[in-house]
Image (cartoon, grey):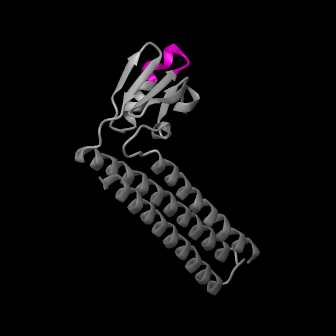
Amino acid sequence: MNVATYDINELKRRMSGAQAVLKQELSGLRTGRASAHLLDSVHVDAYGQNMPLNQLATVSVPQPRMISVQVWDRSMVHAVEKGILAANLGLNPSTEGQVIHLRIPELNEERRRELVKIAHKYAETAKVAVRHVRRDGMEALKKLEKDHKISEDEHKRMDTEVQKATDQAITDIDHALATKEKEIMTV
């Protein structure tokens, strides 16, 4: 039983991790001004692997509606551009040498809707991560019962705990999404 108690705390910790990632991604969706965090989710195929943008360049905000990306290695400029475009952030890179400029468009109704779609995509990814943690927990409980380390009643009780933790995590994700959506859509 001690193993399973530890297990539920570990599952809750992993679910909280998915929520923390979502909050970080949502914080990158700025409504009205440029933010270096907007590029936190950008990954680039560089040196034979998939790397976060911040390991290849310096991201700065020289103006309220402009993000500058100073790429350290000239040979990686094109790869960084591709990574930014692949992130589907609705930004078009403009390159001058090793510096990529990203102009943040005015937040018209269409751009707000794009940001909301991106926020929904982030939330769905977080929900999938939470469901994966739930599945891992349920499988661990089945194994514990099969190996006769917990009884059927304990399995059912712990199953309920895992489901409650999952439901709470999904509710928290939905709340964070609703808050961000309201922030984005408020004129």
Q: Is residue 77 magenta?
A: yes
**Would residue 142 appear left or right of 115 to someone viewing this image?**
right
* Viewer-proximal residue among 171 and 144: 171
Quadrant (top left, top right, bottom left, bottom right) of the N terminus:
bottom right
In the displayed structure, would residue 111 be above or below residue 158?
Answer: above
Residue depicted at 42% across the width and 46% down the height: 29
Picture layout, residue 46 above or below residue 183? above
Return the x and y of residue 145 as percentages of the image width and height: 65, 77
Q: Main secondary structure of the magenta part?
A: helix
- Asked if residue 29 is positioned above or below residue 126 in the image, the reply reads above
Residue 147, how many percent across, how many down?
69, 74
Magenta range is 71-79
The residue located at (49%, 63%) in the rendering is 131
Q: Nearer the viewer, residue 51 or 84?
A: 84
Decide if residue 138 is on the left or right side of residue 94.
right
Residue at horizontal 59 percent and vertical 56 percent from the top: 17
Between 8 and 16, the residue placed more toward the observer is 16
- The residue at the far bottom in this view is 153
Q: Is residue 75 magenta?
A: yes
Instruction: Give residue 104's quadrant in the image.
Output: top left
Relative image position of residue 79 (x, y in whole percent): 45, 23
- Residue 62: percent from left, percent from top: 47, 27
